[in-house]
């Protein structure tokens, strides 16, 4: 049974789903989306013996906007997530995220690794190549203006289809891409500016918890090599390539809960 | 066993052929030196070549073209029907040295019947890889091949005026395209080398489809021959993937290009459907 909570966090109402009982796992969504991305994998993971917390990040889904306007620094989300875990009374929690959520989870490991069981960062690495990141941030800055962002909804829809894995059946692909249209472009673009500027390469060697980097082979947004390199630079880093999966593993495959359960239990053995 | 294409009608855009490894020998290098008279130290002096950053003396660039042609003839493709090589546009990406095992990958790109109809031009995209699988040369070369009959097949003759008209007619009958362009008044073009396919659209109707409109397009979507061929002959829609991978360039209004994203995806879809239903058989 899901328990839904609105909690007061950093001056705004934050919505968080809570499923199951056991060690806490925080599950984070992607840019411009919401916790609904975990509607299958979240409860399934809870069935396997975890207390699963699925927040909507500020300005997303059912959470109120951040008081200072759309967030464009993923570190701010990382601090917000750690505050949320404290408020929800989570002890030695794990964090799992995808895309910006993956980078946010990695940021949490940099900030507070010693207090975390471990982190699974999917479709994420420690940061883009500087020049590519700056170019992407500039184009996202431009698209924050509505007048410069024609076909916004079509491009979200077609762009989502373009990065789904080849093992995902067509009706599931259609469902995912259709649901991804439910975004606030101002929030999505701010998220993506955060994605573009994210850089944690210098901190990787100091991360105190296990971190598992996971990339889908069909994910056009990601360079698997950079994720693998990220894992190699983390003392307890691990890397997995998911064959036939794209940028949104928790939405694409029904085996996500079992995979996560195995990876999260391995953290227990490692620490 | 695969039946090798012989006459013009046997070739299909998207068809791909690959070779067994072909070892590059010292004799190859010596023959190139003798035939060309090019005795530059890059080809003749191992120490000089090493100082320039290469593992040994380099084969002359055109050796790649020559070796490809040798493999092509040996393959038996168009053995009794080929009449001429028409052009070669080549890029040299990395060195070829003695001891390399080269492999050739040839993709049939465009097929176009000649004016008289008794022969046709077949475009070939060629990629040459070394032992490690790294591409060392890439190019395009077209050949003239005898035709068996004179029956036109515009659905697979990409970027010809007849193909452009077919795509235009397909878009005209496509309800989703009509809706996507219902508030648009303009023209767009697809470009492949010097060939362009123009579509003039007014409120969802395709007014004209052809090679040369009186007025220029609002924007032109540019890609190379291999990209268009793979796109039009693919089993699944790859337009957005390739756009995200930077395989297209846009000339003209980038804003109108973005605005027509869905309409362009449909244009590619119409071309794919034409090929699948009328051009692939």
Image (spheres, rainbow, N blue to C red):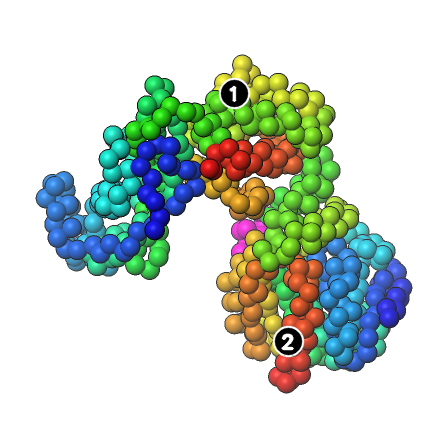
Magenta region: A127-135
Q: Does residue B241 appear left or right of residue A153 in this picture?
A: left
* Numbered disc 2: secondary structure: helix
Which chain is indicated by disc 2? Answer: A
| Tag 1 and tag 2, C-beta contact below 8 Å | no
Which mark is nearer the camera, 1 or 2? Answer: 1
Residue A113: within the magenta?
no
Residue A129: within the magenta?
yes
Q: Can residue B181 be seen by looking at this rendering? A: no
Q: Quadrant of residue B10?
A: top left
Q: Residues within 10 Å of mark 2 (few under 14, many from 20)?
A: some
Q: How far across and down, in percent of the image, does residue B167 sit?
A: 55, 28
Q: Can residue B45 be seen by looking at this rendering? A: yes
Which secondary structure class fits the magenta region best?
A: helix
> Which residue carries the number 1 mark?
B210
Q: Which mark is residue A263?
A: 2
Figure check: A121 above or below A24: above
Q: Does residue B29 appear left or right of residue A119 in this picture?
A: left
Q: How far across and down, in percent of the image, does residue A180 sit?
A: 73, 50
In front of the other: A223 or B278 = B278
* Numbered disc 1: secondary structure: strand
Q: How far across and down, in percent of the image, does residue B102 sit?
A: 27, 53
Which chain is indicated by disc 1? Answer: B
In front of the other: B63 or B16 = B16
Q: Quadrant of residue B145?
A: top left
């Amino acid at each position: 049974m899901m328990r839904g909570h609105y909690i007061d966090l950093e001056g705004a109402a934050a919505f968080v789903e809570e499923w199951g009982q056991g060690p806490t796992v925080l599950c984070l969504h992607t840019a411009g989306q919401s916790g609904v991305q975990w509607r299958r994998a979240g409860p399934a993971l809870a069935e396997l013996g975890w207390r699963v917390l699925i927040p909507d990040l500020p300005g997303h889904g059912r959470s109120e906007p951040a008081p200072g306007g759309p967030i464009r620094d993923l570190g701010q989300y990382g601090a917000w997530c750690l505050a949320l875990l404290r408020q929800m009374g989570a002890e030695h929690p794990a964090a799992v995220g995808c895309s910006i959520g993956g980078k946010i989870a990695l940021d949490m490991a940099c900030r507070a690794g010693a207090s975390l069981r471990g982190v699974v960062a999917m479709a994420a690495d420690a940061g883009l190549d500087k020049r590519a990141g700056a170019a992407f941030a500039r184009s996202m800055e431009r698209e924050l203006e509505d007048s410069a962002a024609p076909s916004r909804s079509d491009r979200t829809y077609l762009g989502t289809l373009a990065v789904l894995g080849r093992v995902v059946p067509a009706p599931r692909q259609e469902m995912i891409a259709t649901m991804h249209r439910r975004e606030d472009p101002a929030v999505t673009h701010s998220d993506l500016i955060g994605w573009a500027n994210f850089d944690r390469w210098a901190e990787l060697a100091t991360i105190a918890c296990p971190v598992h980097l996971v990339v889908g082979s069909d994910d056009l947004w990601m360079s698997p090599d950079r994720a693998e390199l990220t894992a190699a630079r983390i003392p307890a880093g691990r890397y997995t390539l998911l064959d036939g999966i794209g940028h949104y593993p928790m939405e694409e495959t029904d085996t996500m809960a079992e995979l996560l359960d195995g990876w999260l239990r391995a953290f227990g053995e490692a620490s | 066993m695969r039946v090798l294409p012989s006459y013009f009608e046997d070739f299909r855009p998207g068809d791909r052929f690959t070779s067994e490894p072909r070892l590059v020998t010292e004799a190859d290098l010596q023959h190139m030196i003798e035939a060309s008279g090019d005795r530059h130290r890059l080809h003749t002096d191992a120490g000089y070549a090493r100082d320039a950053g290469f593992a040994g003396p380099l084969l002359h660039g055109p050796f790649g073209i020559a070796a490809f042609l040798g493999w092509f003839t040996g393959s038996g493709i168009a053995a009794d029907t080929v009449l001429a090589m028409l052009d070669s546009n080549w890029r040299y990406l990395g060195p070829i040295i003695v001891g390399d095992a080269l492999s050739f990958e040839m993709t049939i790109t465009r097929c176009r019947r000649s004016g008289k109809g008794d022969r046709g031009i077949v475009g070939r995209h060629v990629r040459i890889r070394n032992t490690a699988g790294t591409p060392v040369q890439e190019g395009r070369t077209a050949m003239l091949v005898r035709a068996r009959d004179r029956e036109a097949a515009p659905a697979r003759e990409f970027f010809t005026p007849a193909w452009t008209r077919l795509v235009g007619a397909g878009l005209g009958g496509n309800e989703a395209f009509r809706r996507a362009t219902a508030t648009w008044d303009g023209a767009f073009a697809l470009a492949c080398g010097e060939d362009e396919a123009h579509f003039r659209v007014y409120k969802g109707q395709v007014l004209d489809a052809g090679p040369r409109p009186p007025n220029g397009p609002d924007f032109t979507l540019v890609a190379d021959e291999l990209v268009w061929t793979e796109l039009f002959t693919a089993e699944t829609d790859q337009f957005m993937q390739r756009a995200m991978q930077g395989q297209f360039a846009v000339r003209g209004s980038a804003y109108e290009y973005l605005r027509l994203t869905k309409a362009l995806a449909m244009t590619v879809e119409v071309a794919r459907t034409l090929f699948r239903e009328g051009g692939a058989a």
